[in-house]
Amino acid sequence: MNKKGLLIVVSGPSGAGKGTICKEVLSRRNDIFVSTSATTREPRDGEVHGVNYFFVSREEFEKKIEEEAFIEYAEVYTNLYGTPKDTVLEKLNKGENILLEIDIQGALQVKKRYPEGVFIFILPPSMEELKNRIIGRGSETPESLERRFSSAFEEIEFVNQYDYYIINDQVKKASDLMEAIIDAERCKVIEDIEDIVKMFKEEG
Ligand code: ADP
Ligand code: 5GP
């Protein structure tokens, strides 16, 4: 039986805890693979090329757009980010579950092309807590903090385009919920159920 992998798309405002929850879920399971995006943003301290992102110049990124190398791409907070098409589709076809942590514009592009994906939106417990988390992460300049925070008010309106939402008040609870969603989606009755029924019938 050749079951396709699940495409898991996770979005939410900056600071909601997407990275933290995805990291926790990935550390618990060996059946989910993360896709490494390309970006024109500068690496932060400790970020590694090919692990956190493929850090590329704007020229290189634009060349890849022309070559249609991305499933989706978007300009987020003045930098370009994109998901490589070939690696993701190859893995899904091999039955591997792939997780994309991408912004809302990108997620909506993926939804058009790949509606069978599962789309999860991470919310903070409050906007005040969101701001505290972005400040606490210490990764932003005052301008980029303000930009990320004010964008968050517009971004949360898009939650209704997603299949699921998770309020990240506690990392463990939020990660448990993400695992539960993924497990439920893997059990959904879709076309592969015909193969399972056939398998049982052949036994009889
Ligand atoms: P995002 O990937 O959505 O931008 P991060 O995962 O980087 O967000 O989280 C932003 C900050 O909030 C980080 O410093 C992280 O450690 C912290 N954080 C994430 N989840 C929680 C939580 N449930 N409670 C408290 N702090 C959290
Ligand atoms: P950061 O700069 O904090 O790593 O990421 C900024 C935003 O870009 C986050 O919302 C993150 O989810 C999003 N992002 C990361 N990779 C991609 C991608 O490949 N495509 C899109 N559309 N967004 C991405």
Image (cartoon, grey):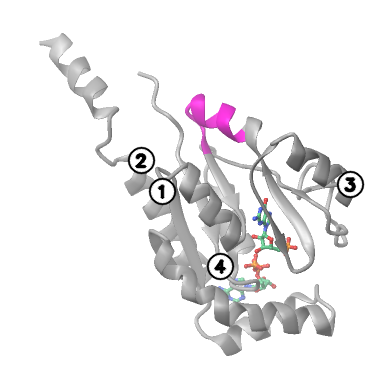
**Residue labelled 1 has its Cβ within 8 Å of some atom of ligand 2:** no
Residue type highlighted by circle 4: Gly
Kindly identify which residue carries mark 4: 12
Find the distance from the CA under tag 1 to the CA under tag 4: 17 Å
State which quarter of the image contains the N terminus.
top left
Q: Which residues are magenta?
A: 88-97
Label annotation for residue 182: 1
- The mark that comes first in sequence, 1 or 4, is 4
- The mark that comes first in sequence, 2 or 4, is 4
**Contact between labelled residues 4 and 2, with CB atoms less than 8 Å apart:** no
Instruction: Tell me if mark 2 has few (under 14), some (14-19) or many (20+) residues whose alpha carbon lies within 10 angstroms of its own.
Output: some
Please, what is the dominant secondary structure of the magenta stretch? helix
What kind of element bears circle 3?
A: helix
State which quarter of the image contains the C terminus.
top left
Kindly identify which residue carries mark 2: 186
Label annotation for residue 59: 3
Find the distance from the CA under tag 2 to the CA under tag 3: 39 Å
